[in-house]
Amino acid sequence: MSGAVIQCLPDAVNDAARIAAQLGVPMHPIEVHRFPDGELRVTAGPAARTTILYGSLDRPNEKLMTLLFAAEALRRGGARRLVLVAPYLAYMRQDAAFRPGEAISQKVVGRLLGQAVDRIVTVDAHLHRAATIGDVFPDIEADDLSAMPAIAATLRAENVDPATVVMGPDAEAEPWVADLATRLGLRHAIACKERHDDRSVDVRFDDATLFAGRPVLLVDDIVSSGGTLMTCTKALLASGAASVDAIVTHALFPPELMSGLLSAGLGSIRSTASVPHPTNAIPLDAMLAEALRGELAGANQ
Ligand code: R5P
């Protein structure tokens, strides 16, 4: 049995191949057959002692089942260590029962994946009430990598306008917005956001003079319905921003929304490659390969 292999979800072949090439290990796509009744038959490739499962968990329900089935086949096939690399980790937002009877999906997904694999690597996990990713996966190793160094590297190469203000849409964004701004030597600001429902939010700014007349770079972890981005773009332009561009870690929104966002005045939107999307512009493979390098030493012992 070989030392290490990457096995990926069917939609992640390109990203997984880049990481496999950087690590010098083979890569196999996991095969998924859908029966007429909707059930799945999942076929993993040959297991290695250390098997890395790669796949982002956007549109997560079928992908979660696929990973659980693949993990079963790989363990039975002899994998001693299973590492899941899920750059986008689903169901992290529902981390409490906000109304009686609501399931805490973060807990369930944490338990399911924690039983299936030995280590999880993710990027900018949406943690709110959980202090760290270790709280979600108490029984296994878990790493929550920041996309900000990769985003900063892309922007540095473009000589971003030094007048730019890095803006977060809500208080939760403060840590990553402050980090990115510091890396680039830019100022940052945070809006106040109030969410009304899945798609509708209001934003206001405590002090619009911080960005009036300057280019604004909106930075968020997730764009899902696009409501936050749309509302922020309109509000920033109405409050005097010279221009608004956006960079997000996880682009979960339907690509058709882009034309509406651009019509609202957004100059551009770019995302990391965490989820395959037409806005992908910031590669994460070097960072992910680096996080996995230590696995290779263990795999050959
Ligand atoms: C919220 O806490 C997140 O950081 C994002 O701002 C939010 O998930 C974006 O969602 P949407 O695109 O649906 O407004």
Image (cartoon, rainbow, N blue to C red):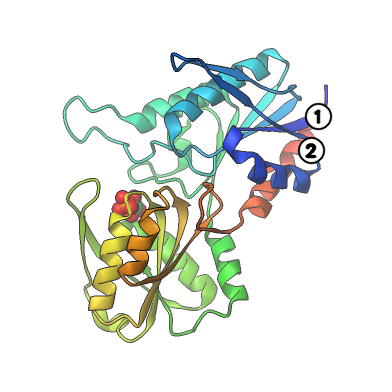
Determine whether, in the image, residue 251 is placed left or right of residue 281.
left
- Asked whether the residues under the numbered discs 1 and 2 touch, taking CB atoms below 8 Å apart as contact, a structural biologist would say yes
SS assignment at label 1: loop
Give the residue number, with chain letter if any, for mark 1: 3
SS assignment at label 2: loop
Residue 19 place in picture, x, y as percent: 70, 45
Count of marks placed on residues: 2
Q: Amino acid at mark 1?
A: Gly
Residue 29 place in picture, x, y as percent: 67, 31
- Up/down of 174 relative to 47, above or below: below
Q: Amino acid at mark 2?
A: Val
Q: Residue at x 20, y 36 (%)?
A: 98
Q: Nearer the viewer, residue 18 or 170?
A: 18
Give the residue at the far front of this rendering.
36
As measured in the structure, the alpha-carbon distance from the residue carrying label 1 to the one carrying label 2 is 9 Å
Q: Nearer the viewer, residue 242 or 83?
A: 242
Determine whether, in the image, residue 199 is placed left or right of residue 12.
left
Question: Which of the labelled discs sits on residue 162, or is there none?
Answer: none
Residue 247 place in picture, x, y as percent: 46, 63
Residue 299 place in picture, x, y as percent: 78, 31
- Label 1 vs 2, first from the N-terminus: 1
The quarter of the rendered structure image containing the N terminus is top right
Picture quarter containing residue 94? top left
Q: Residue at x 57, y 80 (%)?
A: 159
Picture quarter containing residue 244? bottom left
Mark 2, Cα crowd under 10 Å, few <14 / some 14-19 / many 20+, is: some
- Up/down of 142 relative to 225, above or below: above
Q: Residue at x 43, y 67 (%)?
A: 178
Q: Is residue 27 visible?
A: yes
Give the residue number, with chain letter if any, for mark 2: 25
Mark 1, Cα crowd under 10 Å, few <14 / some 14-19 / many 20+, is: some
